[in-house]
Amino acid sequence: MNDKILIDYMYIGLFFLCGIAAAGAPILISLLVRPRTKISQRTLQTYECGNIPFGQSWDFRHGIGFYLYALMFLAFEVDVLYLYPVATVFHKVPAFRAVGLFVVFLGILALGLIYAWRKGVFLWTSEKKIY
Amino acid sequence: MDYFPLLPEIMLIAMSLVFFAATLAKPGQALLERAAFVLALCTLAATWATYDQSGLFFYKAYRIDAFSQTFKILIALGLVLILWMGAGLRGINSWFRPEYYMFLALSCLGLFLMTSAVELLTIVISIEISSYALFVLIPLRRQPFQRDPLEASIKYFFLGAAATGITLYGMSYLFGLAHSTYLEDISVVLPGFLATQPLAVIGIVMLLCGLFYKLALFPLHFWMPDVFVGAAHETTCFVATLPKIAAMALIVRIVAMAGPGSHQIELILMIMAVLSMFVGNLSALGQQDIKRLLAYSSIAHAGYMMVGIVSMNQLGIASAVYYIYGYLLMNIACFAVIYNLAPQGENITVDGLRGLYRRSPLLAAVLAAGAIGLSGIPPTIGFTGKFMIFAAAFQKSFYWLVGLAVLNVCISAFYYLRLVRAAYSSVEEPGERISLTIPAAVLGVMIMAGIVLAGVFPQNFFRLTLKAVMSVL
Amino acid sequence: MHFYQIIAEIIFWLLVLITIGGGFLAIGARMLIHSLMGLSITFLGVAGLYIYLGSFFISLLQVLIYGGAICIVLVFGIMVGYTPRQIVETRIRGENLLLAVPTCGLAVALLYFAIRRTGWVPAAQRLADYSIERVGHTLLYDFCLGFELISLLLLVGMIGAIIVVNSQEEESGGQ
């Protein structure tokens, strides 16, 4: 490895430390300035909502709709993997080719979105019409 | 650039788009069915029209030649016959019929791409497109059978994902050795690597694993019985035949790329073929459920086809292509009987066949033609195909391989003839007569004629396949 | 050895440790969500290893897609799936372990010896340019078919998931 790359790595390390500091500082500051309270069992609850919580979060099965949302998100995040490199060469290739391939790529994916929309994936379960 | 040779793919894309629109608009079942059939026929016509074309497309990633077009004709023919056989989609959840047709078209598109792709990444993606579509098709069975299809789909999915992972891993070795993802470039350096580098052998075998999975060859066959039992009859017929055709096209391409001199690969493929035949045939002996029986027979047939491929001469590969055509016809014959026997789409046992010849003589005859063909008794296509495959293996002096294969043919005759015997055994009360629709009866007669005629007069078809094989070897 | 090289070596082996440790956590955890945590740790370790292979772009995407999106989807998958108590009962048992460990060991040993015996030939002319622009360029030209097919694959996956979910929803709603 040559020295220039190592210096670059040291920059990364520096940014890393800065990131940790930036994330840790609010916790530290709030620790210093906040008023002292008596810590009880109730304080340590994840959600203080007035009711005493019961059971564990994994005792319930959540609606499948959440999963579909996540999957849509995944599909569109994966396409970033392919679109980002293509976008970096957008100014160097013939416009027709770049834009054409882009539109076809996104057009095919958009069909999935249209399908999900028409089938009511984005509706709440109570509003969902029969398939 | 002339895009005419891509007409079959364009037809299938059009078919998928039409049915995508249908999923949103929800037209009636009769219209859907007619549209599916017409579009599939158009695809078949397109493959036929582009048979003589050749060329490289998409920066050398996609190759059209007589070989790929022959396989495309087989796949399109299979799609037409399966749509014909499964008229009415009685086994499919009625809410999802447009989707069902759409995914059939997409899966066929993936298979078309597989037969023509000559670049490793394109190959993987096309394999995945065809299998993802099948993962979705399997659970779309009718309501009373909801659990089994889902289990079948999950098994198919997980094992498929594992097989693809192995394939990709093997490809990474090949890429590391040859520094290219194009089969054309790899084939230049590969024979040299196979002779000196052990990793090249491992890489090729791992690369083939994903295709063996589609073919259901021995170590990767576990999904087959469960998928057969779980999926609806129409879907099962599709899963049993068409992916195997495309997988064989790719296996031939890759094995031809490795060249005929590689004895390690030859040996590995032979061992897999023999084990596949034994596992399939011996497991099929005791089965009661016909679909499970056909699943194991399908595993055994993958073994027979491998015998043809492993010979790696023109006769061997040409007869393997011929055999898979016969396999398509014989399987559709068996599934047409199952489909017509089960109005609600339920699975049928061997005992359920009893007295079939009184209930419907035509169906009994179709079943007999299919089963006799599968067992390899003359004058059917199954006999001619097996005979030529074994002759090719004999030419390469694989005597023990031929001996074991013939032994397996004898074993398999037991359970195939059990089907025929059940269909023709007399019972006190055979049950009510089955009234076939006219298209179903026509299909039955046609398939029977195909099985017998193509077996007696193989010359014309053989000339086609030889021409196809010449373009890869 | 240069001081920087020692640091690089140490970080490399740390990443290897993270990758393998995450894998062990993934298969050994009693609760599924802990397995997932192990998996995400493995993803991050692998992302670090990609940097050592000189592929920053792949490493970035490994963090973004595997460490991020795939793990989120898996979390949702666990949330909608079975409860952990049922999963504890179906953990890897003794006899499976007895079969799995030798099989994996054999496979690794085989690959190891094969890799050691292989004489790797460096490419004739190495492309010095591994930049993102180069990747984009090949996606637009050499691999344009694969590029478009990937969107088709994603489409099939998306619509397929909706169909499979809906086909099951109808069933449970009907009962």
Image: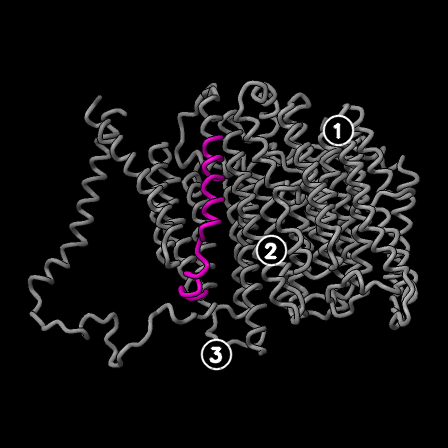
For the C terminus of chain A, the quadrant is bottom right
**Residue name at image x 70 percent, y 57 percent:** B235
Disc number placed over residue B412 in the picture, else none: none
Identify the residue at horizontal 85%, vertical 64% (top origin): B354
Would residue C8 be counted in the magenta stretch?
no
Q: Tell me if mark 3 has few (under 14), some (14-19) or many (20+) residues whose alpha carbon lies within 10 angstroms of its own.
A: few
Under circle 1, the secondary element is helix
* Mark nearer the viewer, 1 or 2: 1
Label 3 in the same subunit as label 2:
no
Instruction: Give the side of residue B122 with respect to residue B1, left or right.
Output: left
Q: From the image, tell me which residue sits under label 2.
A: B135
Asked if the magenta segment contains residue C92, the reply would be yes
Give the letter of the chain under mark 1: B
Q: Residue furthest bottom?
A: A51
Q: Which secondary structure lies at badge 3?
A: helix
Mark whose residue sits in front, 3 or 2: 2
Question: For the magenta stretch, what is the residue range?
Answer: C81-110
Name the residue beneath numbered marker 3.
A126
Residue C10 as seen in the image, left or right of residue B437: left
Give how far across and how far down residue C4 sits, in percent.
Answer: 21, 28
